[in-house]
């Protein structure tokens, strides 16, 4: 009889511990979304050449880093790519970097797309969508502007024009 109570007690204790752990994991995963004024979550992703790129290493060497979440199949993403190309040509020498984070696509398709569009800035592969989830990207394209201290200074959801991009970085660059 005592053995039966012991088994029941162990089952109840196991279920309670699973409930507590499940509750804790839900609390941990309910982090606040990155917002202007907050610190940009660090990440490490691979570029199209297989080179590891860490956000914190990039931002410490730049005045402004744009982290742009996009996909090849996304029409607004395709619209903004020529704007990013022109922007990068004009501002990369002034301490501005663009990290184009592709969300969950085949690396070969992304490589071919980037080449055909003439993307002249680093394209990173978020194959499992982990970084997109970390930044709580709900729509693409979404672009975060991060200063040299890692602080998010602005966010644009939707396609960005050259004027939009310039407006966000000019104050940081002192223009």
Image: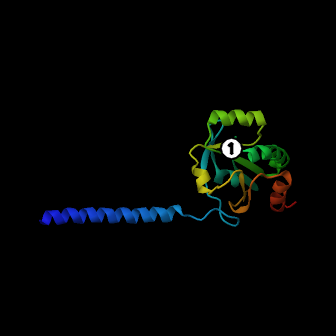
The answer to whether residue 62 is visible is: no
Q: Is residue 19 left or right of residue 137?
A: left
Depth order, front residue of 157/134:
157
What residue is disc 1 on? Answer: 71
Measuring from the top left, give residue 153's x and y in whole percent: 74, 62
Measuring from the top left, give residue 166's x and y in whole percent: 84, 55
Q: Secondary structure at mark 1?
A: loop
The N terminus, quarter of image: bottom left
Give the residue displayed 30% in from the left and 62% down from the top.
Answer: 14
Above or below, 91 relative to 8: above
Q: Extreme right residue here?
A: 175
Depth order, front residue of 98/59:
98
The answer to whether residue 24 is visible is: yes
Give the residue displayed 71% in from the left and 44% down from the top.
Answer: 74
Q: Is residue 68 left or right of residue 173?
A: left
Give the residue displayed 44% in from the left and 65% down from the top.
Answer: 23
């Amino acid at each position: 009889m005592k053995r039966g109570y012991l088994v029941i007690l162990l089952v109840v204790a196991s279920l309670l511990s699973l409930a507590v752990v499940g509750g804790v994991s839900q609390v941990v995963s309910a982090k606040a979304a990155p917002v202007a004024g907050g610190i940009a979550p660090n990440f490490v992703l691979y570029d199209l050449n297989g080179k590891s790129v860490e956000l914190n290493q990039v931002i410490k060497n730049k005045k402004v880093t744009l982290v742009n979440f996009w996909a090849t199949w996304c029409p607004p993403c395709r619209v903004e790519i020529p704007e990013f190309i022109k922007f990068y040509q004009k501002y990369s020498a002034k301490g501005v970097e663009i990290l184009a984070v592709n969300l969950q696509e085949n690396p070969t398709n992304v490589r071919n797309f980037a080449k055909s569009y003439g993307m002249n800035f680093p394209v990173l592969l978020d194959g499992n969508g982990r970084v997109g989830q970390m930044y709580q990207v709900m729509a693409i394209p979404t672009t975060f502007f991060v200063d040299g201290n890692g602080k998010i200074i602005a966010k644009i959801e939707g396609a960005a024009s050259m004027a939009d991009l310039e407006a966000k970085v000019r104050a940081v660059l002192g223009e």
